[in-house]
Each structure stands twice: as C-alpha cells, then as structure tokens.
Image (cartoon, rainbow, N blue to C red):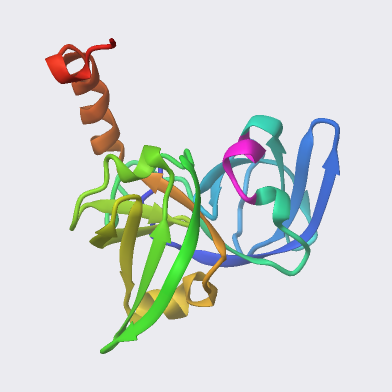
Amino acid sequence: MFTGLITAIGTVSRARRDDEGLELVIDAPYKGLELGESIAVDGACLTVKGFANAGFVAHIIATSLDRTAFGTYVAGRRVNLERALRVGDRMGGHLVQGHVDGVGLVLHVKEHADARLIDIKVPNEVSRVSVPLGSVTVDGVSLTVNAIPEPGVIQISLIPFTLEHTTLGERRPADAVHVEADVLGKYVEGMLRPHLARLPGNRPA
C-alpha cells in the first residue's frame, strides 16, 4: 500500500526484454532496501529482486506490461518512486494500491495562474469512477481530479511543489502516463454493479 506521495526520483539505467517480461535496473537514492520489498515505480508496485551499484532491479511480467507503459521505457528515463507504507506512517495523500488500471494519454497542457492544468484521456476503468475533487493517481502521484472536461477525460492541477519534486512537469501532449483510480470508487462500483444490471434499462435484450 502507498500514499501517492513521491519520496524520490530514480533513473532507469537499464531496460532489458526477455521471454518472461522486462527487467528494469533503476538508480535510486534509497538506503537499506531489502529483497522482496515493494516499491511503486511511476505508480506500479514492483518487487525488489536484486541490487545494482546505485539502486535496485525489478522484473515486470507480461500481464503488467499489458497494463502499463513500461515496455517503452529506456535508459535515462526518470521515474517517480515511493517505498511501501509502514504502520504509523502519515497518510498525506490517499490510499494507493500500486495496481495501475491502465495507460492514459496527455491531451492538453496549459498554465493557469500558479498551477499547470493537464487534461488526460483515461481508460474507461478510470473514467467511470472519477468525480470532480475525487482522488486519482497519475504516474504514482496522488492528485485531485480538478474537473472532467468531457467524457473519458480528467483534468489535474499541478502546483509548483509537485512540478519540482515529481516527473509530471516533464509530461507533454501525446505522452503516456500510468493511471490508477481511487480504490474506494472501484469498490463502490463493484458493489453497485449487480444492482444496476437489474434495472429495466440495463437488462440485456
């Protein structure tokens, strides 16, 4: 479990594909990492399977590659990092599972006063449970849905601190981002789905 508060920015030093998926070597400033530890990399929960001189090694299986943009990552790419929560840690963001729901597409980026507004086309799994002022995770960062400009699109607002301490300030139109919907919204939808399916207008023909 994570909070979506980025604690470091790492750099991919190696990305190697094999028959079993993708191996990433990530340079990171963390001390005391342990084998088997969970780290959110751009919002996806990955397991430390080994160590490199300046960081750690993680393996991404094929099913995770299908739901993320990791297959496009190359050496030199900067990534948002967060270590898993410990009991007693402050919950400054929101409950983030590290289970990426899919890949979003940046549509528009514009400045507004002291903030940067980004419109993102998101998968249906995310859009149908997103509400204005609700929570969403983008590349591992806990954010508030600023607005819903049109169906299937969410708008986020980035303050100067977020722009300085995460990689979201580097995102431009046509860039891909990892998105995870608020887990509370997903549970509510899951509980309501059987009941909504029984409504007259939703019954199969």
User: Where residue 131 sits: x, y (%)?
Assistant: 20, 50
Vertical placement of 45 versus 205: above or below?
A: below
Q: Which residues are magenta?
A: 64-69
In the figure, is residue 43 to the left or right of 204? right
Instruction: Judge whether residue 199 can be spotted in this image.
Output: no
In the figure, is residue 175 to the left or right of 201? right
Vertical placement of 175 versus 114: above or below?
A: above
Does the magenta run of residues contain 28? no
The quarter of the rendered structure image containing the N terminus is top left
Farthest residue to the front: give it: 205
Please, what is the dominant secondary structure of the magenta stretch?
Answer: helix
Which residue is depicted at the point 32% across and 58% down?
154
Q: Quadrant of the rendered structure where residue 65 is?
A: top right
Instruction: Judge whether residue 186 can be spotted in this image.
Output: yes
User: Where residue 48 sits: x, y (%)?
Assistant: 66, 42
Farthest residue to the left: give it: 200
Which residue is depicted at the point 31% across and 64% down?
155
The quarter of the rendered structure image containing the C terminus is top left
Q: Quadrant of the rendered structure where residue 119 is?
A: bottom left
